[in-house]
Amino acid sequence: MKKIIESPFSDGKALLKKRINNMSFRKEEFEVYDFYYKCEDTGKEFSTDETGNITMKQLFNLYREKNDILFPEQIIELREKYGLSSPKMSAVLGFGPNIYKSYEKGYIPNKSNSTLLNIAKDPRQFLKIAEDSKQLNNLELQKLKIIIDDLVKNDFVNEVEKYLRINSD
């Protein structure tokens, strides 16, 4: 973001400013840095798409953190961990056909879907969800079981190594 830009209100410059602002999202209040420009000549304040996007991204991130909602990168990683496509992951979790992809692109899940996503982080829980959903054919389910077995084994090995490191001192 540029610190100085041409002002749309005069032939002069506009300087980047920030202030703390209270904003609400889904009935919750958050303090965010509100970025804006101020025209040196007229004193008029304005925002650009870039400053507005940064302010909104802060708001969304604070909401995600407060409510333990996965970030888009984590949602992508979750799906890839199980080797599924977005539509297949949506079907397994009982979401609409394009919902999972929209979460990967940044749309914020509602609290119930967010809870399900957090539960799905546990491979054993996800396998139960996948089996109960009946959305995977036999081959897909067998592949998923192999992936989950590997994930569980790796988790176990990591926990044992962690235990040994802690107790070897």
Image (spheres, grey):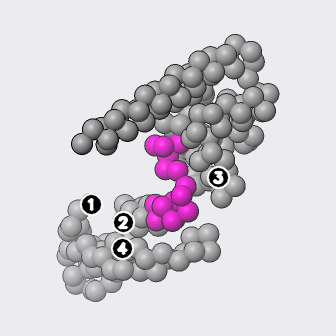
Residues under labels 4 and 1: Cα distance? 14 Å
Callout 1: SS: loop
Residue 133 found in image quarter:
top right
Query: In the rendered view, does 52 fall on the left or right side of 95?
Result: left
Residues under labels 1 and 2: Cα distance? 8 Å
Q: Label 2 amino acid?
A: Thr
Callout 4: SS: strand
Residue 38 found in image quarter:
bottom left
Q: How crowded is mark 2: few (under 14 residues within 10 Å), some or many (20 or more)?
A: many
Q: Main structural element of the magenta stretch: helix, strand or loop? A: helix
Measured from the top left, where is residue 24 in percent x and y? 54, 75
Residue positioned most to the top: 139
Residues under labels 1 and 3: Cα distance? 35 Å
Per the rendered image, the range of residues in magenta is 61-75
Q: Label 3 amino acid?
A: Thr
Q: Which of marks 2 and 3 is nearer the N terminus?
A: 2
The residue to which callout 3 is attached is 115
Callout 3: SS: helix
Residue 111 to residue 158: above or below: below
Q: Residue 33 bears which disc, if any?
A: 4
Q: Which of marks 4 and 1 is in front?
A: 4
Q: Which of marks 1 and 3 is nearer the N terminus?
A: 1
* Of 7 and 15, the residue lying toward us: 15
